[in-house]
Amino acid sequence: MFLKSVRLTSLLLLLNASLTELATADLVVSDNFGNQILSYDQVTGEFLNVLVSSDPNMNGGLSGPVGLVLDSSGNLLVASQNTNSILRFDANDGTFLNEFASAATGANFAGPADIRRGPDNLFYVANFFGSSVDAVAVDGTGLGPFTSGGPGLSGVSSFAFGPDGNLYVASFNTGEIQIFDGGNGTFLNMFADSLPGASGLVFDNDGDLWVASLFTHQISEFDSKGQLQTSFSTGGDTFPSHILISPNNDSELLIALAGAAGIFRFSESGTPLGAFATGGGLIVPGQSLITGAANPLGDVNGDGVVNLQDVAPFVDAITNGMFIAAADINQDGVVNLQDV
């Protein structure tokens, strides 16, 4: 009963934090071909500025950027696919800070794509050519492959921790979604297949999983049992690569269309609602992320949005005594019951 009360109170607290944080947030988009990170207004989609320049003398050698995530201090981590590294930038002005993870830190990436923070506060990276999801410590030390035993797992493009705590992994080359134990990384079972070029995994607030199929230009929604709920086309030659639940309306999707050089709005039923974030020199969008002030309160899982998916890691941080800056709601330097 006590834990249930904490979860309900946490939800209200996180939702309140979302109203505060998203008021000043931006939508940042990685440009996979342009080797830059662009910033757009998260409400209107208006182009704001080039956050991270394509100039190699200013961006730490960023090349082929894809995945984006915030660290616990609110800095921006970017998967630099062509240099097999994760680079860190100031999320407010785009200043290059350091090479966060690479072979030099024991992280043996082969085409890092997606990057997210797990419920255990570690970072996880989709190792595309290594066909695994690798774990990285909060200081950038590589911890090696986390997933194991996935049958035919090939081309890991994206992944997401589900409401059940397990890890859902997109196998790009085989068009499958496989489930791995969220605690030890062992293969559990096949979740969905027939999704050519599977990528862009995201869970909505109802616990349904959305998947982009790059080669068939399809967006699919699955319930917790892997049953198809919705499927729609984004249009010929659009090549959807990433999905973000809109921070402005959780019944809308913001979909990165590689073939249309922008982020486009769609209803959950598939109705096109027009272009959202385009221009500014964007060539091929990789991923998008909501980011705002440093130390984004409430975004405990570091996906750029404060929503129901932050409740479980928020409660875990309290019960296990883990420090996550975004969970330190009262800003006293400790994550505990005083933050509820």
Image: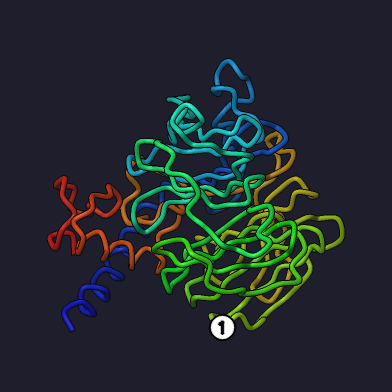
Return the x and y of residue 130 as percentages of the image width and height: 62, 46
Q: Residue furthest front?
A: 149
The spot of residue 118 in percent (x, y) is 41, 55
Q: Is residue 115 left or right of residue 81?
A: left
Q: Is residue 247 above or below residue 189?
A: above
Q: Is residue 90 above or below residue 242?
A: above
Q: Quadrant of residue 136?
A: top left
Residue found at x 64% / y 47%: 128
Displayed quadrant of residue 225: bottom right
- 99 above or below 334? above
- In this picture, is 316 found above or below 85? below
Name the amino acid type tagged 1: Lys
**Residue with the mark numbered 1:** 225
Q: Residue furthest top?
A: 57
Quarter of the rendering occupied by the N terminus: bottom left
Closest to the observer, 157 or 21: 157
